[in-house]
């Protein structure tokens, strides 16, 4: 992990097309702005992990599902 010290208004670049700017620091909260191309998905980590969990659940195939598919043929 790279740890950087930035002040309000300072930014960092990721690759050539993602800019993260410190908008505000208030107590223990930091407000950031992210500029990225539309094709780049940006999620809060807890939301991203929930999406991953739901995707994994959706990919699970039970034996009942397999039997039901066999019966269709």
Image (tube, helix red, strand yellow):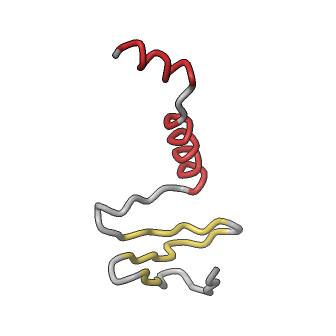
Instruction: Tally the numbered discs.
Output: 0
- On screen, 1 above or below 71? below
Look at the picture and state if 12 lies above or below 51. below
Q: In which quadrant will I find the N terminus?
A: bottom right
Relative to residue 32, is residue 27 drawn left or right? right
In this view, the residue farthest toward the left is: 38
Residue extending farthest to the top is 71
Q: Residue furthest right?
A: 28
Query: Which quadrant holds residue 72?
Result: top left
Q: Nearer the viewer, residue 18 or 53?
A: 53
**Residue at 50% over, 41% down:** 55
Which image quadrant is residue 37 in? bottom left
Residue at position x 39%, y 58% in the image: 41
Q: Position of residue 69 (x, y in %)?
A: 41, 19
Locate the C terminus and report the quarter of the image it occupies: top left
Picture layout, residue 41 above or below residue 22: above
Residue 35 location (% of width, % of height): 36, 70
Return the x and y of residue 48 as percentages of the image width and height. 53, 52
Tell whether 17 sits left or right of 4.
left
Between 8 and 33, the one nearer to me in the picture: 33
Q: Is residue 53 left or right of residue 70?
A: right
Residue at 55% from the left image edge and 18% from the top image edge: 64
Nearest the viewer among 64 and 46 is 64
Q: Residue at x 54, y 34 (%)?
A: 60
């Amino acid at each position: 992990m790279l740890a950087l010290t930035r002040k309000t208004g300072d930014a960092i670049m990721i690759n050539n097309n993602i800019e993260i700017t410190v908008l505000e620091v208030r107590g223990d909260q930091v407000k950031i702005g992210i500029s990225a191309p539309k094709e780049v998905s940006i999620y809060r980590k807890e939301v991203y992990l929930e999406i991953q969990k739901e995707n994994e659940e959706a990919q699970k195939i039970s034996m009942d599902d397999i039997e039901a598919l066999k019966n269709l043929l």
